[in-house]
Image (spheres, rainbow, N blue to C red):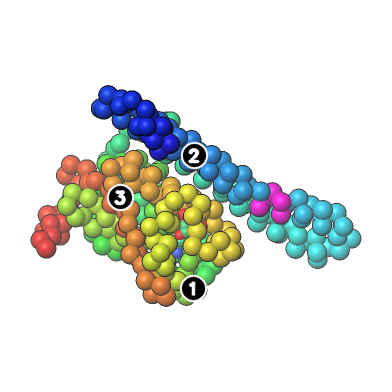
Amino acid sequence: GVHGVRLDSGAAPPPGPVALVLQDVTEVRRGEAVRRDFVANVGHELKTPVGALALLAEALEDAADDPETVRRFATRAGRETERLGRLVRELIDLSRLQGGEPLPELEPVQVDTVIAEAVDRTRTAASAKQMVIATGGEHGLVVRGVEAQLATAVTNLLANAVAYSPEETKIAVAARARSGFAEIAVTDSGIGIPRADRSRIFERFYRVDQSRASRTGGTGLGLAIVKHVASNHGGSVTVWSEEGVGSTFTLRIPLAAGGVPDPDTAIEIE
Ligand code: ADP
């Protein structure tokens, strides 16, 4: 960076250590820039629902003698408040996951339980769109992890599958053991993700289509949370997608010792 150029133009500095220091400065700078961007993004994201609520409050005052309008505005105020609440909750989740707090002890966690919990939490949203969530794959897998975090991650994937799919389509969530990992795959027949966006959707606040995402009430933090949960567990999350066909998100989490119940179904030779 700038520092490197300035130093290099002077007397030759001792090579190794200086390079190391410059590297550190660059890292710190980058960290600062990322934090600044993040705060700016948070501010922007908070502004939208807060602005909407302010307008609605004003409109409610004016509409006081028209019960139908009052009801309509009140419903919208409720929706905006919900969105604000979700944003705040997810920001807190994300800041916990990003470090600062030590990771709770990893314990044996049943994948079946994680999936059941996530399906439970998404069922209402799915039925509202006449969508069915099918579960399948291997049962009895055990991973090393934090159950609440894993349930949040799978819930976020399922919630996206519902949000970005047309009504009356099907979602599948399936687990299998592979190379020491449990793979939990969430597949939808939704709108898919353009190739150019695929590598960026795990970034905080990144959305393929801002207007569409705000209609669905998204915060742009769901996949960033999934990514942090995966990396906290020594795992990963990947996406396969085709526009107009659908998407599959695969979460990989290390199996606990003896986490595979039946070697015949678990070991696959490619
Ligand atoms: P959001 O709250 O906007 O859903 P996410 O971090 O969960 O934020 O996802 C980031 C973006 O990735 C979404 O805005 C959407 O454009 C895209 N996306 C995520 N999951 C899917 C999916 N299953 N199908 C299509 N697009 C998706």
Amino acid type shown at disc 2 = Ala
Quadrant housing residue 25: top left
Q: Main secondary structure of the magenta part?
A: helix
The residue at label 1 has a CB less than 8 Å from ligand 1 = no
Secondary structure of the residue carrying numbered label 2: helix
Boundaries of the magenta span: 48-52
Q: Is residue 92 left or right of residue 83?
A: left
The quadrant of the image that shows the C terminus is bottom left
Q: Is residue 253 visible?
A: yes
Amino acid type shown at disc 3 = Ser
Q: Which residue is mark 1?
A: 166
- For image coordinates 37% across by 32% down, the residue present is 9
Q: Which residue is mark 2?
A: 33
- For image coordinates 61% across by 44% down, the residue present is 43
**How far, Cα to Cα, is label 2 from label 1?**
38 Å
Q: Nearer the viewer, mark 2 or mark 1?
A: 2
- Residue 50 magenta-drawn? yes
Note whether 62 is above or below 6 in the view shown: below
